[in-house]
Amino acid sequence: MHHDDTTPKLFGLLAEFDSATAIVNAARRTREAGYTKIDAYSPFPIHEMDEALKLKRTKLPWLVLGGGLTGMLGGFGLQYWAAVIQYPLNIGGRPMASWPSFIIPAFETTILLASLTAVIGMIALNGLPMPYHPVFNVPQFGNASGDRFFLSIETTDAKFDLAATRAFLDGLNPLGVSDIAA
């Protein structure tokens, strides 16, 4: 006998709050309770949230520095190759490798590669484009861009137990707790 299970798979639980202070306190308590696979959603940036969720610093500044240095060395190297190696023309008795004349184009290639690295790095590190995320399945989540704040705990968290996690989230005094279908 074949049994067809139409119950949607659970991605996690989503708690809804009505203020930034409430979600920051809830995120802090959730982290202190030992949950690690948590995320917060709000209609505007909340600077205390990074500390409350214990988020790691981004690698983006190091990527931009690497892109900028690569651009500088590439721009300088290209000019050196063109002026000294490939097309050496001695005009007016000037030295072939006249580095002061190489500064402006090298600066421009520094800015070009640093900015491109910043854009591409941000897109890659943020996991974009992400046209779908399971939290979009929760009808109340539409208010995340307006006036509501949400805290999610994923089922992949080592401490996740459906009943215990739901009871924990209810103890944070949210407006409501919803299942997130995968």
Image (cartoon, grey):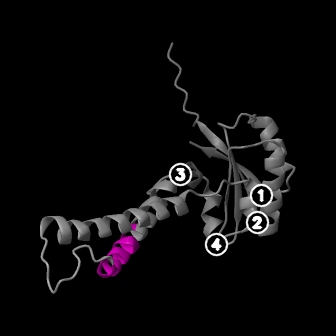
Mark 1, other Cα within 10 Å: few <14 / some 14–19 / many ≥20:
some
| Residue farthest to the bottom, as pictured | 92
Q: How far separated are the C-alphas under marks 1 and 4?
A: 22 Å
Q: Name the residue that disc number 2 marks.
A: 48
Q: Name the residue that disc number 1 marks.
A: 52
Q: Give the residue type that dot 1 points to.
A: Ala
| Nearest-to-viewer mark from 2 and 3 | 2
Mark 1 vs 4, N-terminal side: 1
Asked whether 3 falls inside the magenta stretch, the response is no
Image disc number at residue 133: 3
Q: Residue at x 51, y 12 (%)?
A: 1
In the figure, is residue 7 to the left or right of 93?
right
Callout 4 secondary element = loop
Q: Are marks 3 and 4 in contact (CB under 8 Å)?
A: no
Q: Which residues are magenta?
A: 100-113
Q: Residue at x 79, y 48 (%)?
A: 31
Q: Are marks 1 and 2 in contact (CB under 8 Å)?
A: yes
Q: Give the residue type that dot 2 points to.
A: Glu
Q: Residue at x 59, y 52 (%)?
A: 135
